[in-house]
Amino acid sequence: MTFHSRAAALLVALSTVVLVGCAAPQPSDYAAERPVLSLRDYFDGRVEAHGMFQDRAGRVVKRFTVVMDCRWNGEDGVLDEAFTYSDGSTQRRIWKLKALPDGRFAGTAEDVVGTARGEQRGNAFHWTYTLKQPVGNNVYEVQMDDWMYLVDGKVMLNRAVMHKFGVRVGEVTLSFQRP
């Protein structure tokens, strides 16, 4: 084996290790985790949440509470979210969800571009979507990588990372609580 073929083989091996090491988690990674999350059962009735938004430097720039009225009719769900922010401003988002086969979900909302796609496995739910995010007088479209983890029958933790043009611009952390 020549020096160049050994170097090429080493480069391919190192690239493979780097790519495998950087692989993002998948919902299937949580399939054995308990308690098992049922999105339809958890988001049924009133749910409250407390959260914060951190900018790309990690600074907390907004804190908020959310009161949700959630209901299902067969495979169709509505999550009516009322946000109150630390600066006194408010916002409302109404998610319309559709339960699909094999633990998958689709969702739409007025400030979501297209359709959100999600998958539920074990205690975790992951979905991705593009959100219209107002900043000052502008509205930016950011990609959301959103993970929820059921802790017990009452508490679920949520972490969503926001990207624009592939660059991380912020993160949302939430703690959901059922009465």
Image (cartoon, helix red, strand yellow):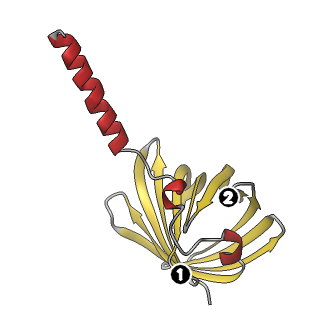
Image spot of residue 107 (x, y percent):
71, 57
The residue drawn where x is 33% and y is 64% is 58
Judging depth in this view, the residue of 126 and 122 nearest the camera is: 122
The residue drawn where x is 54% and y is 56% is 27
91 up-or-down from 166: above or below:
below
45 up-or-down from 4: above or below:
below
Q: In this view, does 23 lie to the left or right of 51?
A: left
176 up-or-down from 4: above or below:
below
Q: In this view, does 3 lie to the left or right of 175?
A: left
- How many numbered discs? 2
Q: In which quarter of the image is residue 1?
A: top left
Judging depth in this view, the residue of 166 and 8 nearest the camera is: 8
Q: Residues within 10 Å of mark 1 (few under 14, many from 20)?
A: few
According to the image, label 2 marks what residue?
103
According to the image, label 1 marks what residue?
152
Disc 2 on helix, strand or loop?
A: loop
Image spot of residue 19 (x, y percent):
35, 37
Q: Which mark is residue 53?
A: none
Which residue reaches farthest bottom? 179
Disc 1 on helix, strand or loop?
A: loop
Q: In which quarter of the image is residue 5?
A: top left
